[in-house]
């Protein structure tokens, strides 16, 4: 069970990370909280979708401040991820005293081509542009609106989850995102965006011994 939680925690990282690291020094960059619905399908059927929902949930709350973020799922394991502006993603969940870490500077996949479509789709009342990217392992669809901007400078080394590429090409956070890969399918769609100042203490380094995620 723990191995499955770690594995799917890492998969979820590519869903969360393109949202993070918005500059608080420039008021045109987003700071605040975003709620999302989440869907995940394991195409290899190693873990049933119902089990994924049980572990990590089907909703996410993302708290963003400067070059930091915190992601909280509504699953039964109190699953939380932290990015503190460095080269690692930290993960905690109930039942494991260790803080799991994984590098965000690595990505085994790569982008082959991409295109941007203007006024592609309305997502919960907001008209979005669409970046479609073909990779070695599948396709990414990244829906965005320039009212919700992100600072690409924070993502220059952030290759995991394609954050450096997606933020670099759009300068925006995702309002909807679909990863359709060889082994997994995932989709997240925003339901509520609450801009506003986030207190420093809301995103703190989790306490506990560090352990590299498998």
Image (cartoon, grey):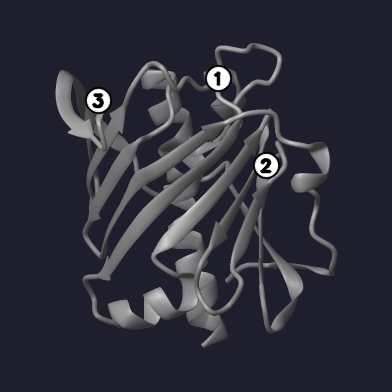
The answer to which image quadrant residue 122 occupies is: top left
From the image, tell me which residue sits under label 3.
128
Q: Are marks 2 and 1 in contact (CB under 8 Å)?
A: no
Q: Secondary structure at mark 1?
A: loop
Q: Quadrant of the C terminus?
A: bottom right
The answer to which image quadrant residue 68 occupies is: top right
The answer to which image quadrant residue 181 occupies is: bottom left
Tag in front: 3 or 2: 3
Q: Secondary structure at mark 3?
A: strand
Give the residue at x 63% y 28%.
Answer: 196
From the image, tell me which residue sits under label 2.
87
**Mark found first going from the N terminus, 2 or 1:** 2
Residue 78 drawn at (x, y percent) = 61, 72
**Mark found first going from the N terminus, 3 or 2:** 2
**Mark found first going from the N terminus, 3 or 1:** 3
Residue 170 drawn at (x, y percent) = 37, 20
Say above or below: 37 vs 190.
below
Q: Are marks 3 and 1 in contact (CB under 8 Å)?
A: no
Give the residue at x 32% y 81%.
Answer: 50
Residue 24 drawn at (x, y percent) = 69, 20
Please identify the residue farthest to the bottom as the structure is shown.
Answer: 1
Q: Gap between marks 2 and 1, in whole Å? A: 17 Å
From the image, tell me which residue sits under label 1.
151
Q: Gap between marks 3 and 1, in whole Å? A: 18 Å
- Whether residue 148 is visible here, answered yes or no, is yes
Give the residue at x 28% y 32%.
Answer: 143
Nearest the viewer among 75 and 13 is: 75
Nearest the viewer among 206 and 35 is: 35
Q: Residues within 10 Å of mark 3 (few under 14, many from 20)?
A: many
Q: Secondary structure at mark 2?
A: loop
């Amino acid at each position: 069970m723990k191995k499955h939680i770690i594995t799917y925690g890492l998969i979820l990282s590519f869903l969360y990370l393109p949202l993070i690291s918005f500059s608080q020094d420039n008021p045109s960059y987003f700071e605040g909280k975003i709620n999302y619905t989440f869907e995940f399908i394991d195409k290899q059927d190693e873990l049933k979708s119902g089990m994924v929902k049980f572990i990590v949930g089907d909703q996410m709350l993302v708290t963003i401040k400067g070059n930091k973020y915190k992601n909280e799922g509504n699953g039964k394991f109190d699953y939380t991820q932290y990015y503190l502006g460095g080269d690692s993603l930290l993960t905690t969940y109930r039942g494991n005293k260790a803080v799991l870490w994984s590098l965000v500077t690595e990505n085994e996949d790569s982008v082959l081509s991409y295109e941007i479509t203007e006024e592609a789709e309305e997502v919960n009342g907001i008209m979005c542009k669409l970046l479609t990217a073909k990779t070695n392992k599948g396709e990414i669809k990244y829906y965005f609106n320039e009212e919700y901007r992100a600072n690409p400078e924070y993502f220059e080394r952030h290759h995991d989850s394609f954050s450096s590429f997606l933020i670099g090409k759009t300068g925006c956070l995702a309002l909807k995102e679909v990863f359709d890969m060889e082994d997994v399918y995932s989709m997240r769609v925003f339901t509520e965006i609450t801009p506003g100042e986030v207190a420093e203490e809301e995103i703190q380094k989790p306490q506990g011994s560090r352990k590299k995620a498998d």
